Image (cartoon, helix red, strand yellow):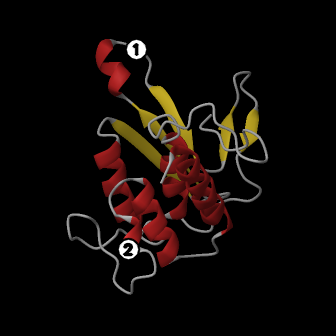
Amino acid sequence: MNKIDEFKFWIATIHALEGATGPDRSIDVDVAVLLGAADEGQRGRPHPHCIDGTPIPHFTKSVEEVEARIRREIPDAMWEFQTEPFIDAHIVDVAPARDGIEPEFWSAAFLTTDDLGETVRLMEKPPANVAIAPTLALLRGMEEVLGFDGMEDDDGPSITRH
């Protein structure tokens, strides 16, 4: 997959997570492919697995499996989930704190703040469940890591980390 196709796949996966109404194994596989944990050949398989042979995490169902992946992708991260008054998740990279620098906000699922401190919605309605929220935050935050920083989808730069 070339970089433009990978970018479009990333956008489509984020949109699928935003529109998900609950657990969805096909979205789990797409997330694993984006994170480099599985290859595209796992799509549509009845028992998809990661490159290392382990089952693909349930990114849309299991908070514990999503937390394990966040720990793996961002070892110095702290995260918080909320369920009231709506479902959301935030990820903060605390690595800068070791150097006496303020921890860096990394990503959110539903609501964030802009440079002026104003609340910004990243999607129309909150994620469907508490596992989808941190999965969305993780993928949104991977924008720079995956090399998509500055790229725009057909609707413009609507998918942002912060």
**Element on which disc 1 rests:** loop
Image quarter where the C terminus lies is top right
- Front-lying residue, 162 or 156: 156
Tell me what residue is drawn at x 52 percent, y 76 percent: 23
On screen, residue 83 versus residue 29, left or right, reads right
Circle 2 Cα neighbour tier, 10 Å, few/some/many (<14 / 14–19 / ≥20): some
The residue positioned farthest toward the left in the image shown: 52
Name the residue type under label 1. Answer: Ile
The residue positioned farthest toward the front in the image shown: 2
Position of residue 137 relative to residue 92, above or below, is below
**Element on which disc 2 rests:** helix
Q: Which mark is residue 152?
A: none
Of the residues under marks 1 and 2, which one precedes in the sequence?
Answer: 2
Position of residue 83 relative to residue 48, above or below, is above
Tell me what residue is drawn at x 44 percent, y 65 percent: 59
Q: Position of residue 71 (x, y in %)?
A: 31, 47
The residue positioned farthest toward the top in the image shown: 100
Task: Name the residue carrying label 1.
Answer: 101
Q: Position of residue 87 (x, y in %)?
A: 61, 59
Name the residue type under label 2. Answer: Gln
Q: Position of residue 132 (x, y in %)?
A: 53, 63
Q: Which mark is residue 42?
A: 2
How far is disc 1 from disc 2 in space, using C-alphas? 41 Å
Q: Quadrant of residue 12?
A: bottom right
Q: Position of residue 151 (x, y in %)?
A: 64, 36
Circle 1 Cα neighbour tier, 10 Å, few/some/many (<14 / 14–19 / ≥20): few
Tell me what residue is drawn at x 57 percent, y 48 percent: 7
